[in-house]
């Protein structure tokens, strides 16, 4: 088992990535500070394992052998083929729901005898994404609203809108421009409804003045109604889940093509690089955030960025993703007048820049098998503007003493040596049988991962 404590994975390069100059050398791997041993799951290194393919599931990309890295003795099987599979939720009667924004539906996978039976639970929706249960009530986040349904015996009844008027590409004031229309939803222990509302773009400052405010986590009463801002400065908090103690966490897709904010030479050409967009800096900045939210929490975007460098501005600085402070964004907040970044609470955990965390869930006590125990599971979709690319994986964050430990890789191997991918995990959830179920929208699959 390896803990993610490095800045660059040694892979072949992808040409034509955004923000990359053909003449700029690729940065070398950077060291990181090991986390305290008490904060991680102490387990063996991962081992290569063949991906097992059940009958009828062997079409591309599984028409050839695929291998993953998994904990020793664990098996990975292609349990179901679901094109464009996104977020997941288990029903009270042990069916696995899969959202498919591309197709406007929610599919139910009914276990039993190998390959599960597939049934369409809901259809004709507007980019359904987030799924959450509270008792027998199913919440589904469309791009412009959140619906609630009474779930009984594989059917839904009494559909109603509990939160409406959410911004998407059909909102008149946006005129079709919306980069993060998909919404996630989580339900607090008191029944309150939490909704992720992404930004319209990379650094679209106007989102902070919109109504409803974008780049936020919104909170609505248990019975539904007008939402209020729970946390702001959340560029795209697609990962949204409630921990065992009832607190809400978000995993954030942060900004791209960041300008170097320090008045010093970074690329070694003996000139000051402040305000420059350099691939070597973009590769590791800003880190993606994994934050515990409280009412009014501010995560900085687009004025402040979480800083992974222990020696800020030093190209050889070691990296850390635990308890990291904020620094000013040179492009949007050079003098600090927009937001005092030094006053923002450090982010609890994080991961490498451009990891693209999507689905977030908690495996509660006893948690995963072996030494893992309880913790958070994050589907890491992988980078688009990093050189070399950051690979997709399923990450684990151990739940210890009421908080999350640092990122550890649980499942990887979706990326080829040339940087291309045959799979991209979106979400991982623990099933009622103790196995891990992982959606993959690129391979069009749901995997079942089991311990010995």
Image (cartoon, rainbow, N blue to C red):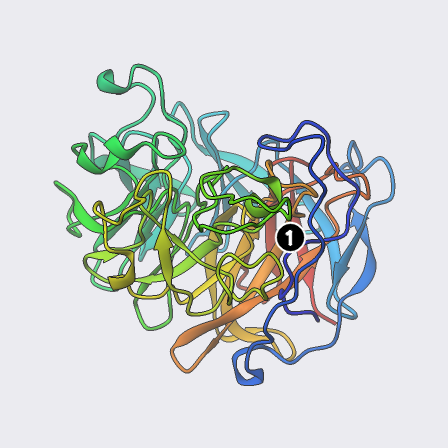
Quadrant that contains the C terminus: bottom right
Residue at (65%, 78%) from the top-left corner? 370
Give the crowd class for mark 1: few <14, some 14-19, many >=20 residues within 10 Å.
Answer: many
Residue 404 horizontal/vertical position (percent): 45, 71
On screen, 237 above or below 69?
A: above
On screen, 205 above or below 398?
A: above
- Which residue was labeled with disc 1? 393
Residue 182 horizontal/vertical position (percent): 40, 34
Residue 338 horizontal/vertical position (percent): 22, 45
Instruction: Looking at this view, name the residue that lies furthest to the front.
Output: 270
On screen, 153 above or below 209?
A: below
The quadrant where residue 314 appears: bottom right
Judge left or right: residue 251 versus residue 318: left
Quadrant that contains the N terminus: bottom right
Residue at (56%, 44%) from the top-left corner? 271
Residue closest to the eye, 133 or 389: 389
Residue closest to the eye, 310 or 345: 310
Residue closest to the eye, 36 or 395: 36
**Helix, strand or loop status at disc 1:** strand
């Amino acid at each position: 088992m390896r803990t993610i404590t490095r800045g660059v994975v040694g892979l072949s390069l992808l040409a034509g990535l955004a923000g990359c100059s053909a003449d700029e050398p690729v940065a070398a791997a950077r060291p990181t500070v090991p986390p305290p041993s008490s904060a991680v799951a102490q387990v063996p290194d991962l081992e290569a394992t063949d991906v097992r393919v059940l009958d009828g599931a062997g079409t591309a990309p599984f028409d050839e052998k695929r291998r993953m890295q998994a904990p020793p003795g664990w098996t990975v099987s292609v349990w179901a083929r679901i094109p464009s599979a996104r977020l997941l939720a288990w029903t009270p009667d042990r069916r696995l729901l899969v959202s498919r924004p591309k197709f406007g539906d929610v599919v139910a996978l009914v276990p039993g005898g190998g390959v599960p039976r597939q049934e369409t639970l809901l259809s004709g929706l507007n980019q359904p994404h987030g799924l959450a249960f509270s008792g027998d009530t199913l919440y589904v986040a469309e791009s412009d609203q959140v619906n609630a349904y009474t779930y009984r015996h594989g059917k839904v009844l009494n559909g109603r809108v509990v939160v409406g008027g959410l911004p998407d590409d059909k909102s008149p004031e946006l005129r079709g421009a919306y980069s993060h229309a998909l919404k996630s939803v989580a339900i607090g222990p008191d029944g309150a409804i939490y909704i992720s509302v992404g930004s319209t773009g990379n650094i679209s400052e106007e989102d902070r003045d919109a109504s409803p405010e974008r780049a936020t986590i919104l909170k609505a009463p248990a019975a539904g109604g007008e939402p209020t801002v729970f946390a702001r400065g959340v560029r795209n908090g697609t990962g949204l889940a409630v921990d065992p103690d009832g607190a809400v966490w978000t995993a954030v897709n942060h900004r791209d093509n960041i300008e170097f904010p320090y008045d010093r030479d970074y690329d070694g050409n003996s000139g000051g690089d402040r305000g420059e967009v350099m691939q070597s800096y973009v590769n590791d900045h800003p880190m993606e955030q994994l934050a515990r939210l409280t009412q009014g929490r501010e995560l900085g975007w687009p004025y402040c960025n979480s800083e992974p460098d222990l020696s800020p501005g030093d190209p050889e600085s070691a990296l850390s993703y635990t308890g990291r402070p904020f620094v000013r964004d040179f492009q949007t907040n050079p003098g600090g007048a927009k937001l005092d970044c030094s006053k923002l609470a450090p982010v609890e955990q994080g991961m490498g820049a451009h990891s693209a965390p999507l689905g977030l869930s908690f495996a509660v006590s006893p948690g995963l098998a072996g030494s893992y125990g309880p913790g958070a599971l994050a589907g890491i979709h992988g980078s688009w503007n990093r050189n070399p690319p950051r690979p997709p994986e399923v990450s684990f964050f151990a739940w210890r003493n009421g908080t999350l430990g640092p990122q550890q890789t649980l499942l990887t191997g979706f990326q080829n040596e040339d940087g291309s991918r045959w799979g991209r995990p979106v979400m991982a959830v623990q099933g009622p049988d103790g196995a891990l179920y992982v959606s993959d929208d690129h391979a069009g699959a749901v995997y079942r991962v089991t311990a010995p």
